[in-house]
Amino acid sequence: MIVTRTPFRVTLGGGGTDLPAYYSKYGGFIFAAGIDKYMFVDVNRPASDDLIRLKYTKTEIVERVDDIQHDIARETLRIRGIEKGIEISSVADIPAGTGLGSSSCYAIGLLHALHVLKREYVSLRELAEEDFKLEAEILHRPIGKQDPYMAAFGGLTVLEIERDGAVKVRKAAVSDETIDALNRNMLIFFTGTSRSADEILTEQQRGAKEEKKEVIESMHYIKDIGYEILEAVEDGNVTDVGRLFDAHWQHKKRISGKMTNERFDKIYDAAKENGALGGKISGAGGGGFFTFYLENNHRRFKEVMHELGLREMRYHFDFEGSKTLVDF
C-alpha cells in the first residue's frame, strides 16, 4: 500500500499569467502558497484478481483501463503503463471545483504514488511537468503551470515562467514573523459555491490568444501587482498585501464577466466595510473561496461573513509539497 499527501494552494499574485496563451507571448509569474489542506491518494495492488478499482466520489470496478470514466485516473494509468490489478482511492480536505487546484492535486498525488509503486525516482519538477502534459496536452484542459507546480512543491513559492514554458522555481524569502502575520490576517472563507473553472479559463485563454486589449492590459497589470505582493511579503510589509489584493481584484474582474456576480460583489463590499483592506477569489473566479486581508476586528469580521453564508477555513501554510506518507 502506498499513500501520498498533496497540498492545495492559494494564489497570492500573478494568477492567470501562467496560462500558455499569455506566457508564450509575455512570460508568466506566480506567487502562491501551499496550505495544510490535502488530497490523499491510496494505491494498492490486490492479490485476489486483476480488476481495476477506483474510489472517489463514485466507485468504479472495471476490467480495462479504457473503461475508466475518471479521465485523470484513466490517462495517468496509461502514462505509467499499468493495465490491470490495481486499487486507487482518494479523499480530500476540500471539494472539487473550489479554485484551489484539486484536479492537479489528484493528478500529482496519483502520479507520485504510481512512481513509488514502480520504484521509480521522480523529482518534483518532473511530477509537475508530467501532470501539465497530462491535463493540458492529453486531456486538453485550459490549465496553467501554477496548479501542477504548486501541488508538487507547496510552500511559499515563486514561479517564473519563460515564453517556451520552462519554469524557474524558488522559495520566497519570508521571515517567520511575516508568515505568522499572514496566517493571522489572511482569512479564507468558502462561498458555498463549487464550479468548473474550465469555461472561465477558456474565455481567458481566448482573450489572451486573440490579444484583446482589455484582457492583455489587465493580465499585465495582474503580473505587475504579483511582483509587488511578493516584494511586500519578502520585505515584511504585510499591510501592503491587503491593498494590493484590492487592486488585483478590480483588474481581475475585467478579464471575464463570469469572474464575479451580484452576491460576490455584495460579499466583497461588506468585507471592505468591516475592515478588510482587500481580497481575492480563488482560482478562475465564479465560486470557491474568498481570501481577505485585515489586521483588526477579526471576530466581528467572521461574524459578518457567517451572516452572509460563508464558512471560514482555518489553515496554516504547507512547506513540504507532495510526499509519500505510507510505503509498504
Image (spheres, helix red, strand yellow):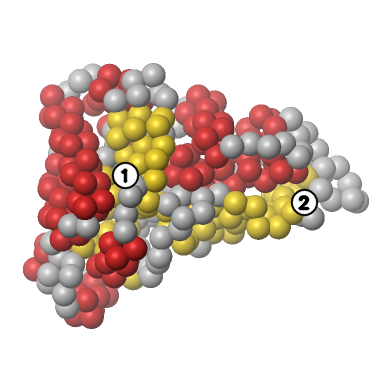
Residue 139 pos. (x, y %):
52, 29
For label 1, the SS is strand
- The image quarter in which residue 42 lies: bottom right
Query: Is residue 107 in sight in this rendering?
Result: yes
Residue wearing tag 2:
44
Report x, y in % for residue 217: 14, 29
Q: Residue furthest left?
A: 273
Quadrant in the picture for the C terminus: bottom right
Q: Earlier in the sequence, mark 1 or mark 2?
A: 1
Closer to viewer: mark 1 or mark 2: 1
- Neighbor class of circle 1 (other Cα within 10 Å; few <14, some 14-19, many 20+) is many
**Cβ–Cβ below 8 Å for labels 1 and 2?**
no
Q: Residues within 10 Å of mark 2 (few under 14, many from 20)?
A: some
The span from disc 1 to disc 2 (Cα, nearest Å) is 35 Å
Q: Residue at x 18, y 27 (%)?
A: 216
What SS does tag 2 mark?
strand
The answer to whether one can see residue 263 in this image is no
Image side of residue 109 versus residue 315, left or right: right
Give the numbered dot on residue 112.
none
- Name the spot of residue 32 as percent of width and height, x first: 35, 48
Q: Residue shown at 42%/52% (left/top)? A: 155
Quadrant in the picture for residue 225: top left
Image point 47% across, 39% down: which residue?
148
Find disc 1 in the rendering and name its residue.
Answer: 31
Q: Is residue 65 left or right of residue 218?
A: right
Residue type indicated by callout 1: Phe
Q: Nearer the viewer, residue 185 or 252?
A: 185
Depth order, front residue of 6/44: 6
Q: What amino acid is at disc 2? A: Asn
